[in-house]
């Protein structure tokens, strides 16, 4: 596994001005450094296993999902609450139902 470092500026870049490699690194960091440990494990594990193979459209969807509140995400993944339709396909995959 290669070591990588991103600056704070790298974490704030939008998909339009970053390389695919940098974007995947940013998404992995954001996946593993959430507000609650449960979401670190769910999102981080999913990111490690799937981001490299995802299309740009799928990366856009994952990036949008990471902007959501951790408490909401956990309720959606655990089935305690219904998620917004735009996140449903990815939530199903994260929950192991899709």
Image (cartoon, rainbow, N blue to C red):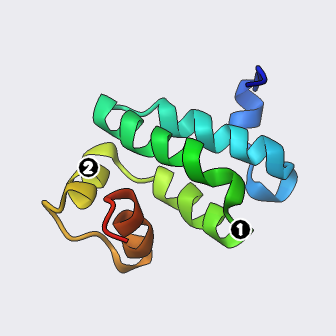
Disc 2 marks which residue? 74
Q: Could you tell me residue 74's position as x and y percent? A: 26, 49
Residue 17 vs 6, above or below: the answer is below
Earlier in the chain: of badge 1 and badge 2, it is: 1
Numbered-mark total? 2
Q: Tell me the quarter of the image containing the C terminus.
A: bottom left
From where the camera sits, is residue 36 visible?
no
From where the camera sits, is residue 30 visible?
yes
Position of 84 with respect to 7 (left or right) is left
Q: Could you tell me residue 71's position as x and y percent? A: 25, 46
Q: Nearer the viewer, mark 1 or mark 2?
A: 1
Position of 48 with respect to 98 (left or right) is right
Residue 56 vs 42, above or below: the answer is below
Q: Tell me the SS state at disc 2.
A: helix
Q: Could you tell me residue 5's position as x and y percent? A: 76, 21
* CA neighbours of label 2 inside 10 A, class few (<14), some (14 to 19), many (20+): some
Query: Residue shown at 81%/45% (left/top)?
Result: 21
Q: Could you tell me residue 80's position as x and y percent? A: 13, 60
Disc 1 marks which residue? 55
* CA neighbours of label 1 inside 10 A, class few (<14), some (14 to 19), many (20+): few
């Amino acid at each position: 596994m290669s070591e990588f470092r991103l600056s704070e500026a790298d974490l704030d870049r939008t998909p339009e001005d970053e390389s695919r490699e940098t974007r995947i690194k940013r998404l992995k960091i954001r996946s593993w450094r959430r507000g609650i440990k449960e979401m670190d494990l769910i999102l981080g594990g999913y990111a490690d296993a799937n981001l490299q193979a995802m299309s740009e459209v799928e990366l856009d969807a994952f990036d949008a999902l990471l902007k959501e509140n951790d408490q909401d995400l956990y309720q959606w993944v655990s089935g305690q609450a219904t998620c917004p339709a735009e996140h449903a396909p990815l939530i199903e995959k994260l929950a192991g139902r899709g």
